[in-house]
Amino acid sequence: MSPAHAPRPGPTRIDEWLAAAAALLAPVHTAARLETEVLLAHVLQRPRSHLRAFPERALSPGEANGFLGLVERRRRGEPIAYLTGAREFWSLPLRVTPDTLIPRPETERLVELALEHLPGDDAAWVADLGTGAGPLALAMARERPAAHVVATDTSAAALEVARGNAARLGLGNVEFRRGDWCRALGPDERYAVMVSNPPYVPAGDPHLGRGDVRFEPRGALAAGPDGLDAIRRIAFAARHALAPGGWLLLEHGYDQAPAVRRLLMRCGYRAITTHEDLAAHPRVTQAQRAGSP
């Protein structure tokens, strides 16, 4: 065989592996280069800056096989957060698994609004309904160390992930309880603030079969024909768990704000307001229980 027709050697160096992997992902993922860097950094247990600082470093056979396996799974659509087992939320490094919803940046708006109702030195009781991996509960616990945060979920597996995240972050002012929304709360407990990022996608929405959400727990995404089943239950039950003058804050779909406001009005809440996320989509509606705090 002449040198011109000799087979090209496969990749060996970090930069060569990244280029080859990005070419595999590019037809199906727009951020192919970034994603390959995240995956390789995870395999090497190094920051992404290491890849740029040492592009000539050769991968061992084990590292190369591990990297290729993750790239192939990503090519089939598995979310990066599940492949690496990690997601940052509110600058907190969180462990996530297929038992939990992947925290999304727009949900940080819910934290911002909740904190406005929680003075920094107030030992208020706060509830996070449907906590998943714990992003809302842990963000509020970090920002308001005097508060007592109760986080509920029906999934034992999700609560295990959330408890682990709280332990790794050293947050001792969070209590995790298993139960359906407000049913995990004590009958005599009264909360100053209750938050929830419940499932709100209509069960027949075609987006449930596309992209990353195909791999997320369906019960954390879909809620009945109009997507409002969980919000209805929370809005009704929270009236009895909130302290007089307490606040309920709900994340919802970009086109659901009018329906959520009507629902809260029928449940007797006041001061009902919808807030936009960073993308200017109506994302969070808050309402206050009647009565003086």
Image (tube, rainbow, N blue to C red):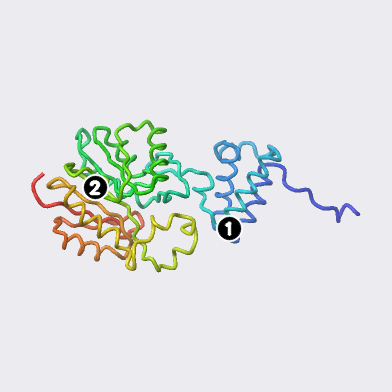
Q: Which residue is mark 1?
A: 76
Q: Nearer the viewer, residue 38 or 161?
A: 161
Q: Which residue is mark 2?
A: 194
Q: Position of residue 179 (x, y in %)?
A: 31, 47
Q: Secondary structure at mark 2?
A: strand
Q: In the rendered view, does 208 fall on the left or right side of 141?
A: right
- Which quarter of the image is occupied by the C terminus? top left
Residue type of the residue flagged with mark 2:
Met
Q: Position of residue 288 (x, y in %)?
A: 16, 52
Q: Residue shown at 24%/47% (left/top)?
A: 194
Using the image, determine if residue 115 lies above or below residue 217: above
Residue type of the residue flagged with mark 1:
Arg
Q: Position of residue 88 (x, y in %)?
A: 43, 43
Q: Are marks 2 and 1 in contact (CB under 8 Å)?
A: no
Dot 2 alpha-carbon crowd within 10 angstroms: few under 14, some 14 to 19, many 20 or more = many
- Which quarter of the image is occupied by the N terminus? bottom right
Q: Residue shown at 42%/45% (left/top)?
A: 157
